[in-house]
Amino acid sequence: MTTDKSTSLWERLERPAPAPRQVLSPQRIATAAVAIADAEGLEAITMRRLATELSVAPMAPYRHVSGKDDLLELMVDHVYADLRLPGGLGWRESLRALAVRTRELMLDHRWLAQLPPQAKLALTPNVMAVAERALAALDGLGLDPDTMMSVFRGVDAYVHGAMSYESAVSAFMGEQSLSSGDELRSELAPLMTWHMRTGRYPIYEHYLRTATRKDDTRWQFDLGLNCLLDGIAARLNI
């Protein structure tokens, strides 16, 4: 039996489970798929591989998900359930906590930075809950709804942009079997040396020769985030 594609995954999952209750569940499917992606990347996930990991018939997962698009949404929702914010914080502390915890989530699940567009835009219950908490932190400050959403999306975009670059570096280092920033710079040295010898990038060369936090990604992330939050506070007088 296949799923009804005319309704969304989340509408279908809200419906009462058929009796007798099946051994396979969306939770089991998501847990298995996330484990595969964490260990081997998104490209390792197929419906057949998933069925094998779950020790079920190849068509069994289709009772809950119509295909890989649904599966990716289920995975995103599953990991976003871990993204919780402490209560009683001001808007800045709430958005900072959200940004830091989103970064931690993306470090734990590197595949989040490699999702296709449809999955990145997935409106899952736990993703919606994160947005709701962020907007609630901005509510009551005298901001109009458009401004509140823009602030939330700005912080979210900063996190995902920073993590997209960080994840790309990490993936490249893995592919090249590099274990440190020094090894990465040695790998890139011939091309970088050519660029520097052109004399076109004196400020960049100064950075290369004098910077001391090239590999401190958490410090880089925190500084950029603080600059963004400072700008929001100053611009909106909040």
Image (cartoon, rainbow, N blue to C red):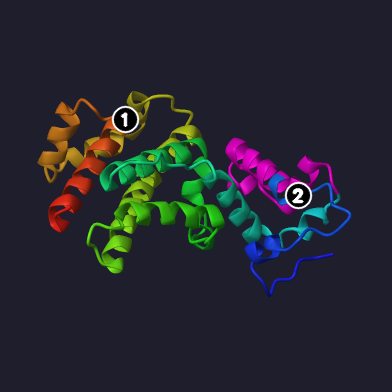
Circle 1: residue type = Arg
Q: Is residue 27 above or below residue 14?
A: above
Q: Residue at x 18, y 52 (%)?
A: 238
Q: Is residue 119 above or below residue 202?
A: below
Percent position (x, y) of residue 51? 79, 47
Instruction: Tell me which segment is drawn in magenta.
Output: 28-56
Percent position (x, y) of residue 42? 59, 47
Depth order, front residue of 107/206:
107
Q: Which mark is residue 185?
A: 1
Quick one: SS at disc 1? helix
Depth order, front residue of 224/9:
9
**Which picture quadrant has residue 125?**
bottom right
Residue 52 magenta-highlighted = yes
Percent position (x, y) of residue 178? 44, 27
Q: Main secondary structure of the magenta part?
A: helix
Tell whether 220 sits left or right of 35.
Answer: left
Which residue is under mark 2?
Answer: 25
